[in-house]
Amino acid sequence: MRSSKYSKAEQAALTKTAMQQAALRWDIPGLVAGVDEAGRGPLAGPVVAAAVILDDLHPIKGLADSKKLTASRRDALFDEIRAKALCCSIAMASVEEIDQLNILQATLLAMRRAVEGLRLKPIRVLVDGNCLPVLRIQAEAIVKGDSLVPAISAASILAKVHRDRLCADMDQQYPHYGFARHKGYGTAVHLAALQEHGACEQHRKSFRPVTDVLNKAMP
């Protein structure tokens, strides 16, 4: 009978090492996160960012730029992404931070918060657009990444749906403005409501249409 080339002590050590490696299987190099935002252009509400690490073993069909999907399809994909992704994180920068920092810096702040909120640490981050947040991880900006990279598409869907739901909540609190319909963008209906009712706490005071209304209201 052929004897093992390892002693019992060595076999026990190898088994222990294998178990430790299995427990750390998601900490090995290779995890890539996609990042995108929603809400840079509106006159009201926070800017929202999401970070997603997809699971290759559980692919999600139909991922695309959130702006090219119907609301019902985005809602369905939102739930599927949350269920199937290895991990995901949603973060935001407030209206106050937008006014203090400017919209670009607030957007990058929300993106950084989203990445830092991931339960698993990626080795690389792919960000939609041409600007990068300050990260301690290798990152790459990809123009039109929400149409090219599935993980970024997933992040765009999470950010868009989450922000739309925040706008629905804002609509309940401030029903005069129609936030549930226009999501804070400067539509004719929104601008007319601004002129009639003035600005509320959720309006971005650094954005010109809101600034004009506030200046007009000053004695």
Image (cartoon, helix red, strand yellow):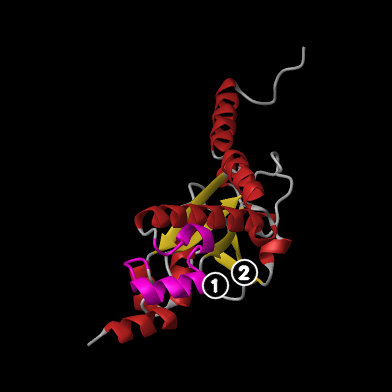
Residue 23, compared with residue 182, is above or below; it is above
Judge whether residue 216 can be spotted in this image. Answer: yes
Please tell me whether mark 2 sits on a helix, a strand or a loop.
Answer: strand
Q: Assess disc 1: are there few (<14), some (14-19) or many (≥20) residues with their C-alpha within 10 Å of its C-alpha.
A: many
Q: Give the range drawn in magenta.
A: 176-202
- Which quarter of the image is occupied by the C terminus? bottom left
Mark 1 and mark 2 residues within 8 Å of each other at the beta carbon: yes
What residue occupies the far front of the structure in this picture? 196
- Which quarter of the image is occupied by the N terminus? top right
Between the residue at mark 1 and the residue at mark 2, the CA separation in whole angstroms equals 7 Å
What residue occupies the far right of the structure in this picture? 1
Counting from the top left corner in percent of width and height, residue 29 is at 61, 52
Name the residue beneath numbered marker 1: 132
Tell me, for residue 23, which label it has, or none.
none
Name the residue beneath numbered marker 2: 140
Counting from the top left corner in percent of width and height, residue 137 is at 53, 63
